[in-house]
Amino acid sequence: MDLNFSAEDSAFRDEVRAFIRDHYPAYLNEKIHEGEEMAKEDFLAWHKVLHQKGWVVPAWPTEYGGTGWTATQRYIWSEETAAADTVRLMPFGLSMVGPVIYTFGTPEQKAKFLPRILSGEDWWCQGYSEPGAGSDLASLRTRAERFTGDDGKEYYRVNGQKTWTTMAQHADWGFFLVRTDPTAKIQEGISFLLIDMKTSGITVRPIITLGGEHEVNEVWLEDVIVPVENRVFHENKGWTCAKFLLAHERTGIAGVAASKRNVERIKDVACKTEDGGEALMANPFFKRKVAELEVDLAALEYTELRTLAGESSGKGPGPESSLLKIKGTEIQQRLTELALEAAGTYGAPYFRSMGEGDNSFAVGPDSARRTAPVYFNMRKTSIYGGSNEIQRNIIAKMVLGL
Ligand SMILES: Cc1cc2nc3c(=O)[nH]c(=O)nc-3n(C[C@H](O)[C@H](O)[C@H](O)COP(=O)(O)OP(=O)(O)OC[C@H]3O[C@@H](n4cnc5c(N)ncnc54)[C@H](O)[C@@H]3O)c2cc1C
């Protein structure tokens, strides 16, 4: 593995850095910093800038809108966007259903959906999990029954409930796993459907999370009629699409670049925070925690670089993605714990979920403002995308051969 960046890569880094500096909508960071709720248009503002530049889906094949960047260039891109603290693009269209459609979809599906995913016109949500089907996803029970309509066309009638559906309240379309053959072995009777979220019979109900945010939802489907042409890949073979998508979901989840930025931010706060007459950063217990995090983060970074080097030489993401997910999310959570510790009592007024906190006027230093909401919000990372326990099972089986 060659860890030195080439002259071309360094020039690319300069180009990316200049582009972000000149084109990133700065008001977004002010909004985040002020703790204001982000609207759909806010998430889309950066998306649209990148779409115009042709940089919205670096990892897609160029024929569908990808940039053709090397794995190293994609790594530089993720480092630079993290360093500049740009808003995260919503992954459901760009990183999840988009790759499923260009890999398994019909020419009509590609023509209809891919351009609108790229432009941001269609916002997607993921209808996989159900009450009783999370880690054991294949036991899902949402049912799709096929019938011929009065117009002679083929349709599915869908009934069931999905849960934890992130951002469904804003979604134009959803990709759903549904059971089309209840008599087949559980993984063999599932199909992958694209459903217009405005279809009659769909109800989206909010779930307010520990952080006091409306990010996830319950989605109820009652006699929802979906044209068969909206099914991706063969009937009862949706599990193939589901597994392909999950592998994509886990890559990039390590979040090394963002964690590096957060370590620096915590160090900066701890240098300015007084603790018993001296800077918190001078406290040996605190300093030790920061140092341990930095060591683990460096190890994670090299593991990610090794995976990247493998990808450059044609090796697809394997069980390494499970490893990156576990270590990456553990580090992200430890960072939020340390940030809250550094904020101390000034974090408390912003405990939104307690019903009483979330001061509308500032208390304490600005840096304390987002620590509690982010701390609570980040508890999710070890659960979603396949819980960390499940990732450990994958490593035990695929890497250790247990
Ligand atoms: C914030 C958030 C956003 C989400 N967004 C979406 C979304 O947009 N779309 C979507 O479809 N889903 C979404 N999910 C759902 C997520 O994928 C599931 O929560 C996850 O797969 C775990 O399933 P579960 O919640 O049913 O827990 P369970 O599967 O019931 O697991 C409960 C606990 O048991 C452990 N466990 C279960 N089985 C095993 C085993 N075999 N070995 C060891 N331990 C085990 C788990 O690790 C976990 O700790 C989201 C979840 C969260 C928290």
Image (cartoon, rainbow, N blue to C red):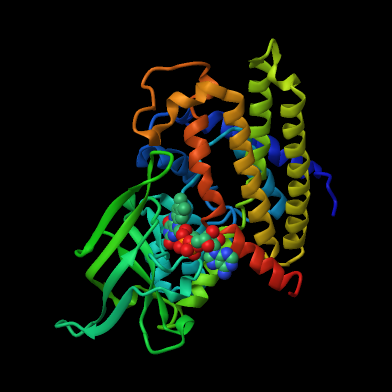
Q: Position of residue 142 (x, y in %)?
A: 33, 73
Q: Is residue 164 visible?
A: yes
Residue 23, above or below 229? above
Q: State the residue lying farthest toward the front.
A: 276
The part of the image, by quadrant, that contains residue 39 is top left
Q: Residue at x 78, y 40 (%)?
A: 295
Q: Nearer the viewer, residue 64 or 36?
A: 36
Q: Residue furthest left?
A: 150
* x and y, in percent, of residue 372 in the image: 49, 32
| 77, 327: nearer the viewer | 327
Nearest the eye: 227 or 354 = 354
Which corner quadrant holds the C terminus? Answer: bottom right
Image point 45% across, 77% down: which residue? 238
- Which percent across, then down, holds residue 235? 40, 83
Is residue 386 visible to the viewer in this orientation of the structure?
no
Answer with the quarter of the image where residue 230 lies.
bottom left
Q: Position of residue 95 (x, y in %)?
A: 52, 57
Q: Examine the rendered structure and indicate whether residue 360 appears above or below residue 129.
A: above
Q: Is residue 121 left or right of residue 158?
A: right
At x 49% / y 29%, what residue is drawn?
370
Task: Please state, as top left, top right, bottom left or bottom right, where the N terminus lies in the image.
Answer: bottom right
* 313 over 286 or under it: above or below: below
